[in-house]
Amino acid sequence: LPRQPAAPPLLALDIGGTLIKLVYTASCGGGGAELRFAKFERRRMQECFDFVRAQGLVHRNGSTMGSSKENIALKASGGGAYKYTEDFREKLGVCLDKVDEMDSVVSGANFLLQSVPGAAFTHMNGKKSSVDISPNNLFPYLLVNIGSGVSILKVTGNRKFERVTGTHIGGGTMFGLAKLLTGCKSYDEFLQLSQKGDNFVLDLIVKDICGELVCQKQGLSTSTLASSFGKVITSKKKLTDYRPEDLASTLLSAFTYNIAQISFLVASILHLRRVFFGGSYIRGHKSTMQNISYAIDFWSQSKMQAVFLQHEGYLGALGALMSYGD
Ligand code: ADP
């Protein structure tokens, strides 16, 4: 028999406020296909175009590999799919077939949860444990997608969801402030700095206000955060007197606890016990997951659980890829 031609690769994009995420298929041994992931800063879009060409994900004439001319649209989610339509047409010769952003995020999360064993895990007390998801105990759940901003969705089934609320104080806000305050050049550098820092240099804790003795008498935890950055007010230090490491650590804990607390409140109002977190903000970073888990556990008195996902930054792009089957 003549050899079957390899399946043409599929490519889908999620063009967000900060990052362009790509999910694409590549053939692997045994005739199967595997999923691959790549991301680019949106301000460096040319790198994304070069990558797509170098990987052979589109032909020079613009058509996706192996597909006919009338099928040269790439599924794309995220606001940038509208804004950068022309750039993709000019540079890659492809048109973007827009898919709804929230629809994609939910499809991506449901795909990971239903089809990828071990994709969901908890991160408590330094321990990562995978969560068994069976189709009959998955829904309903709360999905918190932490990107440049934060979207909070109630998911009740496949393609069944409601965007309940969100907050504009998200990853973009934190990373923006981090660039101004610490001079960091990249998100990974920011995370590394935060790892070496001590947030108690800038954060006001309950003990600082009440004194250790009163805290002990009233049974208050001495290390509970009272006010992020609160110590700065009474200090004579200037910005340059603070270590970038300590500033980074304070920023990460302030934003992470805040987003976790909002998530807890929304889950409480909706009577949901399981909260899944996605978005590139998390970036597989241990202390981010640790702090989210701690906050959800603390506020819910252990009634709710924070669950994380592998490939958490690619939910929208995965969902867009799924939509080729529609
Ligand atoms: P969006 O779709 O809005 O771009 P993402 O889910 O991609 O959102 O998350 C973007 C956020 O993730 C940034 O605001 C920042 O907090 C964080 N982040 C993770 N990796 C990077 C990176 N390489 N460059 C910039 N921000 C990053």
Image (tube, grey):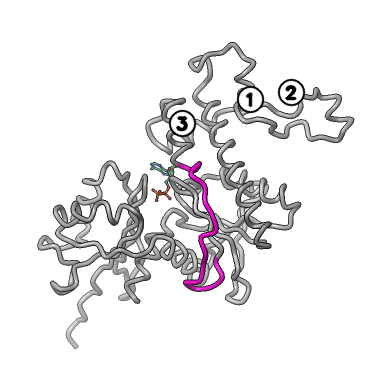
The circle drawn on residue 178 is 3
| Circle 1 residue | 230
How far apart, in angstroms, are the residues tagged by discs 3 and 1?
17 Å
**Which numbered circle lies on residue 316?**
none
Mark 1, secondary structure of its residue: helix
Magenta segment range? 155-171
Which of the two labelled residues, at mark 1 and mark 2, occupies the earlier sequence position?
2
Q: Residue furthest top?
A: 236
Going by the numbered disc 3, the residue's amino acid type is Ala
**Could you tell me which residue is drawn at 44 percent across and 64 percent down?**
108
Tell me if residue 106 comes above or below residue 302 in the rendering: below
Q: Quadrant of the image for the N terminus?
A: bottom left
The residue under label 2 is 208
In the image, taking residue 15 as reference, residue 61 lies left or right, namely left
Q: Give me the residue at 52% from left, 51% from top.
A: 166
Nearer-the-camera pick, 190 or 74: 74
- Disc 2 marks which amino acid? Asp
Question: Which residue, as the protein is rendered here, is positioned at the far bottom?
Answer: 1
State yes or no: discs 1 and 2 in contact (Cβ < 8 Å): yes
The image shows residue 325, relative to residue 229, as above or below, that is below
Q: Residue 12 appears in which quarter of the rendering?
A: bottom left
